[in-house]
Amino acid sequence: MTTDLKKNPARPALMIKRVALVLVAVSLALAACKSPTSTDAGGEADIIVTNDYGSAVDIYMDGEFKFTIGDKWNIEIDDVEIAEHLLEAKQTGTQTVIVSNRIDVTELTDYTWTVDDPPDIDIINNSDEILKIYLDGMYKFEIGEEEDRWITDVAFGERLLQAFSAESGKEVASTTIKVEEYKDYTWTID
């Protein structure tokens, strides 16, 4: 160490400045953090938005753009007034609404809203033949005997599913699934 000081006597002062700078940055970051599960000690209502959609989305509250949030991120909307608020997640850079929700802020506490990924449908083929699967009249895939495959990111609404024999082309089965929740659905073909 003494040889380092003889070569560069300013080195310890530079190290102390770097450590001090890191400590200041960490202190500021910790001061800005709040627990998302506790009531707000500052006497305000906040809405904590979590993005589990699978990609970044734009968040709007009552028609006003708030921020873009990345996948698996949490961002807080601070100091929300007591009232019912419309929250919307839109495709980034567009006005296409992916999902919306109303939150009735009734007290000075933290509220949460999660932007979930779109629903999926698991198709299970328990029949003894290869089938061609259609969703709302559009071909999706072929599915083998005793196989299951997923149709991902299904839009909300009534969805018509049809299974046709790959060999004869005749319809084997069909069903209508009402997609109205952020959950996965299943269609089993016997």
Image: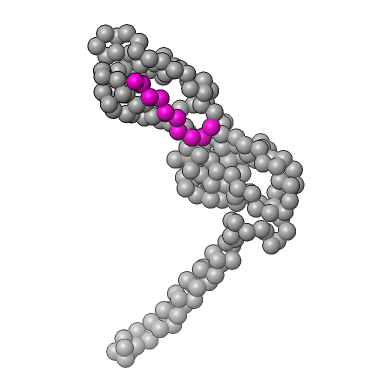
Residue 113, x across and y down, in percent: 59, 44
Residue 85, x across and y down, in percent: 69, 40
Question: Please, is residue 70 above or below residue 167 in the view?
Answer: below
Residue drawn at the location 42% of the way across and 28% of the way down: 186
Question: Please, is residue 68 above or below residue 145 in the view?
Answer: below
> Is residue 138 in view?
no
- Is residue 33 within the magenta segment? no
Q: Please indicate whether residue 63 sits to the left or right of residue 137 in the image.
A: right
Question: Please, is residue 73 above or below residue 125 in the view?
Answer: below
Residue nearer the viewer, 62 or 111? 111
Q: Residue 134 appears in which quarter of the rendering?
A: top left
Quadrant that contains the N terminus:
bottom left
> Is residue 158 in view?
yes
Residue drawn at the location 66% of the way across and 58% of the way down: 39
Q: How many discs mark residues in the rendered view?
A: 0
Residue nearer the viewer, 59 or 140? 140
Q: Please indicate whether residue 166 sits to the left or right of residue 119 in the image.
A: left
Residue drawn at the location 34% of the way across and 88% of the way down: 5
Residue drawn at the location 46% of the way across and 45% of the way down: 71
Q: Residue 144 appears in which quarter of the rendering?
A: top left
Segment tinted magenta in the rendering:
181-190
Q: Please indicate whether residue 122 sits to the left or right of residue 62 in the image.
A: left
Of all residues, the one furthest to the bottom in this rendering is 2
- Is residue 187 within the magenta segment? yes
Residue 178, x across and y down, in percent: 52, 23
